Image: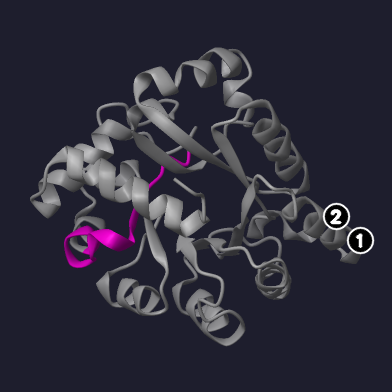
């Protein structure tokens, strides 16, 4: 069965049919989902989902675009949430220079604070990096170095940077973008990297694979990602599912 390592089922895009969709996932071949926090509010929502659904785990953290909300008191709250037994990672955290706000100094400060939180609670990290390749890598090398493990979510850089992260023991998250015709760079990364470091993700409701590009995404679309990875790596779809399932459980330290 398929393991979706990165989803946002608390998003308002699922408000009309969330319960029905989630209740049917396992019957459609989706074994587990990790719902990812991106703010204090969505981290709390994630916690609620993990308590409602046995097959859902969670990550708590504040996305770089939301870091202006953070302060010491909220960091204490985040630490309390991170100690919940079904929270398996700190994330998504990182840098996003696509947007001008908050400023880069704010993003970088709270990125480091959350990397340190992950070390305090001994949880892997879920890294978001957009238009910030070198700064993300430099900060991780200086302040984390792969100490707790983690995943580079929605990887969007080339093989050289992939190699840097792989050498630190990180996993690389591959989702719907790999099915796009213009995703040559990502396909090269998938071809380059070892299968034992690849995990599947949706980032739903975003980044639907072809042929659903532009529509709401869900874990039910992951077979299209499996097929693309299978073709690139020259292995069966069953092998892709089995290997990435094992990788996800290792990444998030979830017993089989």
For discs 2 and 1, the disc positioned in front in the rendered view:
2
Q: Find the residue positioned furthest to the right.
A: 73
Q: Which residue is mark 2?
A: 77
Q: Find the residue positioned furthest to the left.
A: 234
Q: Are marks 2 and 1 in contact (CB under 8 Å)?
A: yes
Q: Is residue 202 magenta?
A: yes
Q: Position of residue 236 (x, y in %)?
A: 12, 42
Q: Quadrant of the N terminus?
A: top left
> Which residue is found at the position 77% from the left and 48% from the top?
40
Q: Position of residue 144 (x, y in %)?
A: 58, 79
Position of 25 with respect to 40 (left or right) is left
Q: Position of residue 230 (x, y in %)?
A: 15, 45
Q: How many marks?
A: 2
Q: Secondary structure at mark 1?
A: helix
- Judging depth in this view, the residue of 203 and 123 nearest the camera is 123
Q: Is residue 166 magenta?
A: no
Q: Which residue is mark 1?
A: 73
- Judging depth in this view, the residue of 172 and 181 nearest the camera is 172
Residue 206 visible? The answer is yes
Q: Is residue 213 above or below residue 16?
A: below
Say which quarter of the image contains residue 63.
bottom right
Highlighted range, magenta: 189-203
Marks 2 and 1, how far apart at CA: 7 Å
> Which residue is found at the position 43% from the left and 57% from the top?
250
């Amino acid at each position: 069965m398929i393991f979706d390592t990165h989803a946002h089922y608390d998003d308002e895009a699922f408000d009309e049919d969330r319960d029905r969709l989630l209740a049917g996932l396992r019957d459609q071949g989706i074994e587990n989902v990790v719902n990812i926090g991106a703010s204090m509010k969505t981290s709390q929502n994630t916690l609620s989902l993990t308590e409602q659904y046995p097959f859902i785990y969670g990550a708590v953290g504040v996305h770089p675009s939301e870091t202006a909300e953070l302060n010491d008191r909220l960091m204490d709250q985040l630490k309390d949430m991170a100690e919940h037994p079904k929270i398996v990672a700190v994330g998504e955290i990182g840098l996003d220079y696509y947007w001008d706000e908050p400023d880069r100094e704010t993003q970088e400060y709270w990125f480091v604070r959350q990397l340190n939180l992950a070390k305090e609670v001994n949880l892997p990290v879920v890294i978001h990096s957009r238009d910030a390749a070198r700064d993300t890598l430099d900060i991780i090398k200086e302040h984390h170095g792969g100490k707790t493990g983690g995943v580079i979510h929605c990887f969007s850089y080339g093989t050289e940077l992939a190699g840097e992260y792989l050498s630190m023991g990180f996993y690389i998250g591959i989702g719907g973008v790999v099915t796009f015709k213009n995703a040559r760079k990502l396909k090269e990364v998938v071809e380059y990297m070892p299968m034992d470091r690849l995990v599947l993700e949706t980032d739903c409701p975003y980044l639907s694979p072809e042929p659903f590009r532009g529509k709401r995404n869900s874990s039910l679309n992951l077979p299209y990602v499996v097929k693309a990875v299978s073709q690139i790596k020259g292995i069966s779809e069953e092998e892709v599912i089995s290997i990435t399932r094992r990788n996800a459980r290792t990444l998030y330290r979830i017993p089989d």
